[in-house]
Image: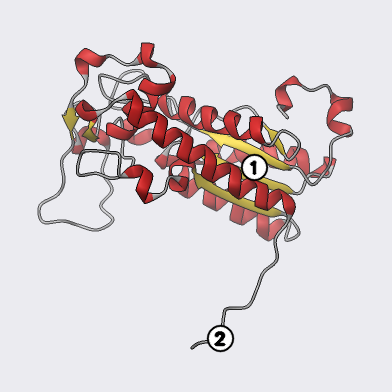
């Protein structure tokens, strides 16, 4: 179900065991070749495809598109929330629905800069409401290694405006890709330093990180469909209910 399309009596009559699915994205630079709304486009597309499969089990909210993107603000057009305001938006969505009886919530993220904030707000809510079922992940975490193997470049995953993201936008919204501007970009510290915090104007030349020149719509279709399959499977299990088992005995 799409929350945006319902009237309040429709919501009143829904099962309270539905999983409330909250997509999160961003509006930030994605190199010279992808649209600013890339993360939100991808998170929304995956979430809507999952809802189409699980319309009786999933209540889909509109995407929270104003993400935590301060590390991209050096590039024109980027809009960013503060971490406090971003977390407050997620908290407000969930706090609004708790009094109505909903108790299962899942945040499906499309922007890496939101990840820590998503975790923090859900942990705070769990401390306040121990009875809630809460979860979060990036849609890209549901793509298995065999699907990422379709990528030709050395990065077998999603970075930023990279081979993977460019391929998925070519699959979903090809008219938004500036194919004449596709480029490989990105820099790494030498020697490597774990946990180094950098802004994107420091670690890239033009804002992308990866091998976007290798992007194709065919690769994007494989990655997108794998993400949808993974998320749908996980949310179906969450909607059905789960139990916690003890660890198996040591052999």
Instruction: Measuring from the top left, give residue 211's x and y in whole percent.
Output: 21, 33
Residue density around tag 2, few if under 14, some if 14–19, many if 20 or more, within 10 Å? few
Q: Residues within 10 Å of mark 1 (few under 14, many from 20)?
A: some
**On screen, 34 above or below 19?**
above
How many numbered circles are shown?
A: 2
Between 113 and 149, the residue placed more toward the observer is 149
> What is the basis of the colouring in this image?
secondary structure
The residue under label 1 is 91
Which numbered disc, 1 or 2, marks the residue that appears first in the sequence?
A: 1
Residue 78 can be seen, yes or no: no
Give the quarter of the image for residue 153: top left
Q: Give above or below for 250 relative to 18.
A: below
Q: Horizontal placement of 88 versus 209: left or right?
A: right
Q: Quadrant of residue 60?
A: top right
Instruction: Find the residue positioned furthest to the top.
Output: 175
In this orientation, does residue 51 appear? yes
Q: Distance from label 1 to label 2 (Cα)?
A: 39 Å
* Mark 1 touches mark 2? (CB < 8 Å): no
Circle on res. 26: none
Is 198 positioned to the left or the right of 37 in the image?
left
What residue do we see at 38% from left, 28% from top? 168
Between disc 1 and disc 2, the foreground one is 2
Residue lying at 69% horizontally and 40% vertically, measured from the top left: 20
Q: Mark 2 highlights which residue? A: 249
Nearest the viewer among 15 and 195 is 15
Tell me where residue 21 appears, x and y as whole percent: 64, 38
Instruction: Give residue 106's position: percent from left, percent from top.
Output: 62, 45
Residue at (67% x, 60% y) in the render = 127
Pinpoint residue 114: horizontal percent, then vertical percent. 46, 41
Q: Residue furthest left?
A: 190
């Amino acid at each position: 179900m799409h929350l945006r399309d319902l009237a309040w009596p429709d919501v009143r009559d829904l099962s309270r065991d539905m999983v409330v699915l909250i997509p999160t994205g961003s509006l930030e630079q994605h190199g010279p070749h992808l649209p600013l709304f890339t993360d939100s486009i991808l998170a929304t597309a995956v979430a809507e495809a999952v809802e189409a499969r699980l319309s009786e089990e999933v209540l889909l909210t509109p995407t929270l598109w104003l993400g935590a993107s301060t590390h991209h603000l050096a590039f024109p057009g980027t809009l960013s929330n503060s971490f406090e305001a971003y977390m407050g938006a997620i908290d407000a969505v969930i706090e609004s629905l708790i009094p109505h009886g909903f108790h299962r919530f899942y945040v499906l993220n499309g922007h890496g800069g939101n990840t820590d904030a998503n975790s923090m707000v859900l942990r705070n809510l769990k401390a306040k409401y121990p009875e809630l079922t809460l979860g979060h992940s990036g849609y890209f975490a549901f793509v298995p290694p065999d699907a990422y193997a379709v990528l030709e470049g050395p990065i077998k995953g999603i970075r930023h405006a990279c081979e993977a993201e460019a391929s998925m936008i070519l699959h979903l919204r090809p008219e938004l890709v500036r194919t004449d501007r596709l480029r490989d970009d990105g820099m790494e510290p030498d020697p490597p330093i774990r946990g180094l915090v950098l802004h994107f104007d420091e670690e890239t030349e033009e804002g992308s990180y990866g091998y976007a020149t290798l992007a194709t719509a065919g690769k994007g279709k494989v990655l997108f469909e794998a993400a949808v399959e993974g998320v749908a499977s996980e949310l179906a299990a969450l909607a059905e209910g789960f139990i916690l088992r003890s660890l198996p005995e040591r052999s």
